Image (cartoon, rainbow, N blue to C red):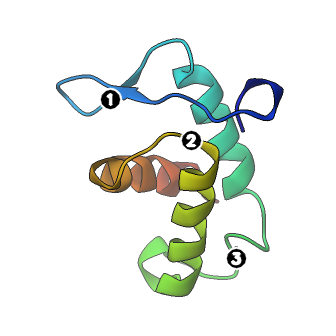
Amino acid sequence: MGKDGGNLHIELNEHGQVIGSEGTRLSSKLGVLARNGILAPLNHKDWRLVPSMYKDRIWAHIKENTDATDDMKHILMMSFRSKWK
């Protein structure tokens, strides 16, 4: 996900918005992941109906490729959800 295969650095402001030089790259990468039908199946009409095993797999992928912490999960998964479908 990151430059040269490294992890993306994620910074959040006081409003929970991604900021910093990697913010745009993160948004782009989340969009690419959201269109991956294997990682995030597109056959569900509503994000709330996507089984948690897929959501856990998505979060694991984000954590493996960024320096995201567990307290960022809600914000990053909301961002992912908005890009899904």
Q: Residue at x 52, y 23 (%)?
A: 23
Who is closer to the viewer here, 84 or 6?
Answer: 6
Who is closer to the viewer here, 57 or 15?
Answer: 57
Could you tell me residue 81's position as x and y percent? 49, 57
Mark toward the viewer: 1 or 3? 1
Q: Residue at x 27, y 51 (%)?
A: 71
Q: Residue at x 52, y 73 (%)?
A: 55
Residue of label 3 = 41
Residue of label 2 = 66
Q: Residue at x 42, y 48 (%)?
A: 76
How far apart marks 2 and 1 lie (CA) works out to 16 Å
Asked if residue 9 is positioned above or below residue 53 in the image, the reply reads: above
Quadrant where the image shows the N terminus: top right
Residue 42 is drawn in which quadrant? bottom right
Of mark 2 and mark 1, the one earlier in the sequence is 1
Label drawn at residue 32: none
- Name the amino acid, label 3: Pro
- Name the amino acid, label 2: Thr
Mark toward the viewer: 3 or 2? 2
Residue of label 1 = 17
Residue 35 is drawn in which quadrant? bottom right
Could you tell me residue 50's position as x and y percent? 52, 82
- Name the amino acid, label 1: Gln
Who is closer to the viewer here, 19 or 8?
Answer: 8
